Structure formats: structure tokens, C-alpha cells
Image (cartoon, rainbow, N blue to C red):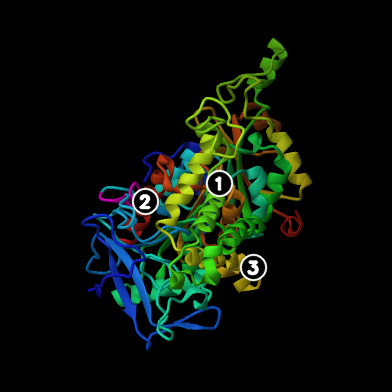
């Protein structure tokens, strides 16, 4: 069914026997038309599937991943060796039950886990794209996924689901391909990136570009990596994924491996040490230029702007069933932003449910063990599947 | 499908036209919406405060938004629904007049059910004991009750008429949930009915303002 190949991962596979997934290649005859006006060809889309496509091709659940995640939803990440990032949500008997549903997740265009991105070789120059890679948008990511589904022979998806940037893609899918999306579950996201969120992204990008090893984006040619800049970017971003309550509960003012403060600038506090660890492990699995491109794609996201400033128009006449989920302590994509989507859908007479989950774990809650979220997704998917007869 | 719908909900369901678009504000676990979808082919939406209830609705395949009647009704477009329902909830809202205004605006028709604080037991309890009444229908103590805006049938009629709404049907609710048609403006129901169900229509003005 699918064309199989080995995606070009940035780094050697460290986990033995890891399933590195599949890759679909689109040649020069199948360029991806981008929002910026340019074309991307050739294009490789690296993806993972779980479960089996049924005979009528009606049981596909498409998962869209967040900024720094990848296609390894429910199986070990071949670079880190860690379990799939949503393995509590996806698997046999899980809310997204792979015994019933055919799960597809593709690495986004501009990413660094096998799908064409700035670290890949530009066919015209024979060198890594670097900053010659065209700017991509959330809509471009969705277009690439649509090309993949076309190639896999999947016309309609039972559900498109994802959190954070994944939720943005879910909304874009529902707006651009209403006839292909039976149901949509955007989690902890927004229909536009806020000023505060753009601000945090800009801090991250400036940290990367201020690193002398970034070398104008050509670090691959120099055998360097802007590790310090990328680590700082990750540290700043990571704070936005948590909540003040959770940080206080987890770390408080606890000292790291010492009884008293050092009167120096070493990592006195546990929270500092934790952030350093987050930054250091991130640079081993993520490409700095990819980080620039994907954060920019999120900044540019404003679904209403594509529809005369009226979000409701993005979904007018939609037959898709929506279930929106937010978290009380998420200040990156707060409930009010998620509710805006629900109100817009209501205004366009779409079928929408909205659930706000009580938690103090902040934005990252969508990746964690949140039984109420699992119950919501399970109940919603079961109801949709029953309606469609899957 | 629910086997036995609560009698007051069954009486409300009876007022809903086949195939209509319905918004149930304070829809609870979705029993009424599910019944309406199954028996009357209703295209229903719900608004509900409790997350557990919303999850129960979602699992039933219903479209329900977690939210608050006091703050969220303003987001719904005018005349978006054939019927807007508010069942046993108006007395627990912060601003009943605003909530009623929104319902009359959002729905071409509005169905409201409410407990009657003019019932003789309530009147007697206050007269005899000199304390805030607690009845089988309204069992809370004054300091922990969610019912912050209780009214009598006569009070509600006054509000509705002041807002230019027309009452098209009135049912009285007995203690065991039985319903029967009533002459709402008469003194009898206000003294003997445990509660009431009204079918209202907003004026042209309520459709354009608020």
C-alpha cells in the first residue's frame, strides 16, 4: 500500500530495533505549493502508522504533532529511545484504539525527523537548505499531510486530532478540507497565535541566531551546531509549557545537590538544573533551523485572517463534528482562546463540544496522564465511530 | 436511549417541534437532548457547567459546550435556534433577566421551567417558623443554596411581560412531577403548583437588542 523507505534522520539511530517509520516521496512532478508563493520539490514526508486500514478506508485517525514532537506517537523514538509521546492516548484498548482505528502521524514539513526541512539537502545546490528553505505555514503542513493521505488512498479521515501546534493543524484541516474530515479534536490550541506567544518564540529564535555557531544558518557546512542558543530557546519555551503552581509544587525553592546557596551563578536551584537538562537533551534531537521555521509557522497562524477576519466563516457549512479541549492552568493557549473557537463554530451552526479539564499542569497537560481528557476523547471517538458505522 | 425521562423533561420534550434546532442551557447529562435527537430528530446543542456532565454528553454523541449561562450566552447568534430551553436553572443564575433576554433572542421560542417559591408550603414556613423555607422541592439551607434568585410564578410572569415576551403555553408541575395546563395569571397555580413550565416567544425587540 505505502511506499517504504528510510527517512533521512539527522542523527544515527541509537535505539536498536527501533521502527524508523515510512517515508513517502513526491518528485519534481508533484511539487508542494506553499503559501509564500514558492514550490517545494522534491518532497519527502516521513510518517508512522499504527493499526490497520479497514476495507472501506473509513477508520483513519490522523494525529498532528506539536512544535518539537514527531511521528513517533505510540512507539519508541529512534533517536532518544524514549516511548512514543502519546502512548497513553494511542494503542490497543487506549482512547485512540489501534485495534479499531488506523492511526497516521506524519512529521511536519520543515521538521527534522525525516520530512523535508531546512537540514535536508537542497537538490539545486547539493548543500543543506539552511535559510534557503522556503518559509512554511501551518496550512503548508496540512497540504503535505493531504498529499500523503492521497498517496495512501485515504479520502476521508474519521478524526483529525492534535494538541498545541497539532491543534492548529486540526483547525486548518477542518477549514480547508471540510468534506474529508468527519470529526476534529483540537486540544490546547488557538485559532491565532497571540502576541505573547509570538514574543516567546522571538526570544527563542534570537537566542539561536545570537549563537556564533549558528553561522547564519549554515552551521552544517561548518560542522558546528548552535547548541547553546537552541538550549536557551528550549529553556524559555519549556517554562511556558508548565504552570506556576506546578513549578512551585515540583521544585519550590529547593536547592540542587547543596545545603545552602553558593553566592555564585552555578545551578543553585533545582528548577535551574531541570531547565539546563531540558535544554541539553533537546539539542540532541532537534535541528536549530527547523526550530526557527516551525516557530515562525505558528506565529503566522491566524485562521480568521484567511476568512475576512471572521473565524466563523472558516467553518461555515461544515458537517464536521468538533470536540475542543482546554486545560484550566494552560496560559500558553488558555481556555479563553479555545473557547473562541467553540463560539465561532457555534456561530456557524457547526456541531461542537467543548471541555475544559481541571489541572494544574499547564499546557503540557495534553501529553500527560489526564484521565478526564482520555475519557473525553474515548467517548467522543466512540460516538463518532458509531455514527459512521466503524 | 434513556428509558424513563424525568416527567418535567418529558413535558418539555412534548413542546419541541419535530426536526427543530434546539439549545438546552444547563443540559445536565444530556438526557433531554438525547431523547429529543432520538424521538424527534432534533438537531440539539447543549451548554453545561459541570465537566463530568459534559463528558457524559460527549460520550452520548451530543454537542455540548462547557460553560456558564451567565457569561456565555452572549456569544450565540440571534435566532440561531428554533427553541432555547432553560430547565430548573434560572433561579441559580446571577442575572436572570439577562439570561432570559438572551434566551428570547437566541431562540425563536423559549421553554423555561422553574420552581415556584409562591407555593403555600413555602409561604407557610416563613410565616410560621420565621425562617427561610426548606421544602422537598427546595431543600437547601439559605447559606449554601445555589438558588440565589428564587421567584414565584407571578414574579416570573411579571418579568416576562415586562420584557415584552408572550406566554404561549403554561403547565403547572406537581410534587410528583405531573404536569397539567394552567391559567398562569390566576392565583391558584401560584399557591398550589410546585413549579411551572412556560413556552414563550420574544418580541421583535428582544430579537434585535441585548
What secondary structure prevails in the magenta region?
loop
Report in which chain the residue with disc 3 lies: A
**Magenta segment boundaries in residue numbering:** A83-92
Task: Please state if A10 lies on the left or on the right of A33 as rendered.
Answer: left
Residue A63 % position (x, y):
38, 60
User: How packed is label 2: few (under 14 Cα within 10 Å), some, or many (20 or more)?
Assistant: some
Mark 2 lies on a secondary structure that is loop
User: How packed is label 1: few (under 14 Cα within 10 Å), some, or many (20 or more)?
Assistant: some
**Label 2 in the same subunit as label 1:** yes
Report in which chain the residue with disc 1 lies: A
Question: Which residue was labeled with disc 2?
Answer: A86
Residue A90, compared with residue A49, is above or below; it is: above
The foreground one among B25 and B4 is B25
Task: Please state if B90 lies on the left or on the right of A351 as rendered.
Answer: right
Report in which chain the residue with disc 2 lies: A
Residue B159, compared with residue B188, is above or below; it is: below
The quarter of the picture where residue B157 lies is top right
Residue B148 % position (x, y):
68, 30
Residue A266 % position (x, y):
55, 39
Amino acid at each position: 500500500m505505502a511506499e517504504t523507505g528510510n527517512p533521512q534522520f539527522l542523527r544515527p539511530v541509537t535505539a536498536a530495533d527501533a521502527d524508523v517509520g515510512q517515508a513517502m516521496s513526491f518528485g519534481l512532478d508533484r511539487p508542494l505549493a506553499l503559501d509564500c508563493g514558492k514550490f517545494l520539490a522534491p518532497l519527502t514526508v516521513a510518517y508512522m502508522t499504527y493499526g490497520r486500514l479497514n476495507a472501506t478506508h473509513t477508520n483513519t485517525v490522523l494525529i498532528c504533532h506539536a512544535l518539537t514532537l514527531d511521528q513517533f506517537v505510540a512507539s519508541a523514538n529512534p533517536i532518544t529511545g524514549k516511548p512514543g509521546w502519546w502512548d497513553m492516548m494511542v494503542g490497543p484498548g487506549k482512547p485512540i484504539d489501534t485495534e479499531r482505528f488506523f492511526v497516521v502521524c506524519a512529521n511536519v514539513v520543515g521538521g527534522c525527523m525525516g520530512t523535508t526541512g531546512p537540514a535536508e539537502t537542497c537538490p539545486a545546490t547539493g548543500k543543506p537548505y539552511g535559510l534557503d528553505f522556503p518559509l512554511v505555514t501551518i496550512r503548508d503542513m496540512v497540504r503535505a499531510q493531504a498529499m500523503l493521505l492521497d498517496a495512501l488512498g485515504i479520502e476521508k479521515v474519521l478524526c483529525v486530532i492534535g494538541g498545541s501546534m497539532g491543534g492548529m493543524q486540526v483547525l486548518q484541516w477542518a477549514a480547508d478540507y471540510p468534506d474529508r474530515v468527519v470529526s476534529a479534536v483540537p486540544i490546547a490550541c488557538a485559532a491565532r497565535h497571540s502576541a505573547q506567544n509570538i514574543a516567546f518564540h522571538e526570544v527563542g529564535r534570537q537566542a539561536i541566531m545570537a549563537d556564533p555557531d549558528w553561522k547564519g544558518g549554515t552551521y552544517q557546512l561548518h560542522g558546528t551546531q548552535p547548541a547553546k542558543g537552541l538550549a536557551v530557546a528550549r529553556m524559555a519555551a519549556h517554562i511556558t509549557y508548565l504552570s506556576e503552581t506546578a513549578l512551585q509544587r515540583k521544585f519550590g525553592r529547593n536547592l540542587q545537590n547543596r545545603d545552602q546557596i553558593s553566592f555564585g551563578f552555578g545551578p543553585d536551584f533545582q528548577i535551574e538544573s531541570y531547565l539546563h537538562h531540558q535544554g541539553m537533551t533537546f539539542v540532541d534531537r532537534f535541528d536549530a533551523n527547523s526550530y526557527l521555521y516551525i516557530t515562525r509557522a505558528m506565529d503566522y497562524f491566524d485562521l480568521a485572517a484567511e476568512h475576512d477576519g471572521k473565524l466563523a466563516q472558516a467553518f461555515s457549512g461544515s458537517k464536521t463534528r468538533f470536540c475542543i479541549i482546554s486545560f484550566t492552568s494552560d496560559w500558553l493557549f488558555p481556555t479563553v482562546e479555545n473557547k473562541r473557537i467553540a463560539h465561532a463554530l457555534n456561530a456557524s451552526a457547526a456541531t461542537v463540544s467543548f471541555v475544559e479539564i481541571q489541572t494544574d499542569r499547564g499546557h503540557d497537560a495534553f501529553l500527560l496522564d489526564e484521565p478526564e481528557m482520555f475519557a473525553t476523547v474515548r467517548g467522543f471517538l466512540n460516538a463518532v465511530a458509531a455514527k459512521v458505522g466503524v | 436511549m434513556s428509558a424513563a425521562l424525568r416527567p418535567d423533561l418529558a413535558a418539555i420534550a412534548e413542546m419541541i417541534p419535530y426536526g427543530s434546532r434546539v439549545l438546552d442551557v444547563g443540559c445536565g447529562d444530556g438526557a433531554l437532548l438525547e431523547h429529543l435527537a432520538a424521538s424527534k430528530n432534533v438537531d440539539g446543542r447543549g451548554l453545561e457547567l459541570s465537566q463530568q456532565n459534559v463528558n457524559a454528553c460527549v460520550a452520548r454523541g451530543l454537542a455540548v459546550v462547557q460553560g456558564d449561562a451567565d457569561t456565555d450566552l452572549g456569544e450565540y447568534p440571534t435566532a440561531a435556534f428554533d427553541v432555547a430551553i432553560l430547565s430548573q436553572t434560572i433561579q441559580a443564575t446571577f442575572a436572570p433577566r439577562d439570561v432570559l433576554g438572551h434566551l428570547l433572542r437566541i431562540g425563536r421560542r423559549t421553554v423555561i421551567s422553574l420552581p415556584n417559591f409562591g407555593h403555600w408550603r413555602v409561604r407557610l414556613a416563613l410565616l410560621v417558623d420565621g425562617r427561610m423555607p426548606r421544602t422537598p422541592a427546595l431543600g437547601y439551607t439559605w447559606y449554601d443554596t445555589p438558588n440565589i434568585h428564587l421567584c414565584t410564578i407571578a414574579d416570573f410572569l411579571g418579568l416576562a411581560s415586562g420584557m415584552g415576551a408572550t406566554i404561549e403555553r403554561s403547565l403547572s408541575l406537581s410534587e410528583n412531577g405531573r404536569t397539567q395546563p394552567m391559567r398562569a395569571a390566576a392565583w391558584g397555580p401560584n399557591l398550589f403548583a410546585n413549579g411551572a413550565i412556560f413556552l414563550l416567544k420574544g418580541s421583535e425587540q428582544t430579537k434585535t437588542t441585548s
